[in-house]
Image (cartoon, rainbow, N blue to C red):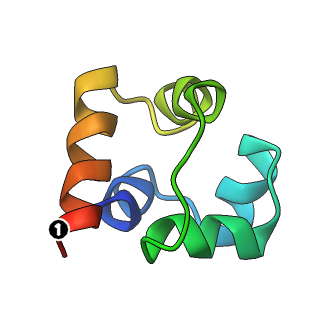
Amino acid sequence: MTLRELREKAKLSIEEAANKLGIAYDYLIMLENNRRKPSWKLLKKMCIVYSAKPEKVFLAIFRTLCS
């Protein structure tokens, strides 16, 4: 599961997720397209917003990097 799939599983649009994460819409697109890497602080927020365990978020980031 990639970051995009993790967001979609949480039933959030890219705009909603960016708003809840406190980041710009464009920045979330860059994260999902492997042009940027999230900070530790943002990783923690992703766990909360996407209702996912940290290991699931880490795995999604790894799969995004490999895709």
Q: Residue at x 43, y 29 (%)?
A: 51
**17 w.r.t. 28: above or below:** above
Is residue 14 shown to the viewer in this render?
yes
- For image coordinates 53% across by 36% down, the residue present is 46
Q: Which quadrant of the figure has residue 34?
A: bottom left
Please tell me which residue is depicted at 29% across the width and 36% down the height of the picture.
58
Is residue 60 rendered to the left or right of residue 14? left
Name above or below for residue 19 compared with residue 13.
Answer: above
Which of these two is toward me, 23 or 50?
A: 23
Are there few (<14), some (14-19), or many (20+) residues within 10 Å of tag 1?
few
Name the residue tied to disc 1. Answer: 66
Q: Within the image, what quadrant is residue 15 found in?
A: bottom right
Can I make out residue 53 in this image? no
Circle 1: element type: helix
- Picture coordinates of residue 32, whole percent (x, y): 46, 69
56 versus 11 height, above or below: above
Asked whether 24 or 34 is in front, the reply is 34
Q: Position of residue 42 (x, y in %)?
A: 63, 35
Vertical arrangement, residue 19 with respect to residue 24, above or below? above
Front residue of 16/40: it is 40
